[in-house]
Amino acid sequence: MYKFLFLLCSMICATPLAQAAEVILPEQLHQIESLQRHADKLTYAELDANNYHLAKARSWLNLALSEYYDKDTSGIISAAIGQAETLLDALEKHQTGITMDTPMQLPGSDTVRTDLWDKITTLKKRDRFSCGQLPIAQAEVYLVWTGHEKAESGWSHAESYVRSVEDRIYTAQVAIDNCTSTPIVVLPPLPVEKITFSTDVIFAFNRSTLEPSALSRLDELTKSIKTKADTLEKVVLVGHTDRLRSDGHLERNTLLSVQRAESIKQYLVSKGIPADKIRATGVGSAQPIVQCSTKMSKEKQVICLQPNRRVEIILNRKKAAEVNKEPVK
């Protein structure tokens, strides 16, 4: 009898906790998606996609989203969301002197590879830091992410994250060494602007039909394209997949990436963007951003490879002499 009462009490007492978890996690996803739209809006309106603080905010959101789908409970999701929110709010308010400091660890992570932190600090002090600001921002967040993976599963699991950090540091080093621009913190608008959408929030798994939740982001993109129409020559959509979806047949990845880019093109056309100004293509899994160990479980690989699943929107601007002052109606 006592044993039965104990079991009954355990079930009743545990129910509120389970319900609380169900409420908290969707709210975190809502926060992440809301902040992603905030970052997109800043990019469309005024900021170059390479902006250091914007790139760091996006990286924090990528971390938070990945750990959300991994059902992480260490506290790193809320902490990463907080980091991104602070940066985006400062950018929206046009604050000057936004701190470039990055915490070396968050709740649920360890401080790792101080030698890589030292390299990043050195690069941030370079005169032409602005030329490598995007990969530097990504490297800092990925190094915190490495510390989380190490704390969660050990160094064997964290190795692929370390390689991603090293790749970004190397990319930044090369960009700074070869830079010929005036040293500034925020890069001026480039002749080509690139915006990246994660396909995980635009399409269902292995599908090319737009999710209803993606339409507001595509509407913002449409508005941005129309605003810049007199200076735009071409909008190029490039679909990318991760390597896991091919099942040994790379052409499946390529086809899926093309179909996804084509779906976005058709939506933009339906909103009034001329079809002849949009080119949709796909490269499958041929151009990954991150590399992840095949020794991980399939579930871990899906999470790790999330940055590779994307659609890049490239806005090719006309030369000054070719600018057409007549916007798209």
Image (cartoon, rainbow, N blue to C red):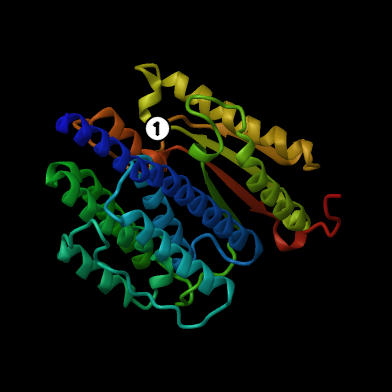
Q: Can residue 228 be seen in this view?
A: yes
Q: Label 1 sits on what residue type?
A: Asp
Please say if 251 is above or below 324. above
Q: Which quarter of the figure has residue 44? A: bottom right
Q: What element carries label 1?
A: loop
The single residue placed furthest to the left in the displayed view is: 155
Question: x and y percent of residue 83 in the render?
Answer: 40, 65
Q: Name the residue under label 1.
A: 242
Say whether residue 234 is left or right of residue 96: right
- Judge left or right: residue 206 versus residue 174: right
Task: Look at 25% across and 48% down and name the residue there.
Answer: 161
What residue appears at the point 20 percent right and 63 percent down from the top-left corner? 116
Image: 23 above or below 199: below
- Does residue 111 sit above or below 153 in this rendering? below
- Bin the neighbour count of mark 1 within 10 Å (Cα to Cα): few under 14, some 14-19, many 20 and up: many
Q: Please tell me which residue lies in front, 234 or 146.
A: 146
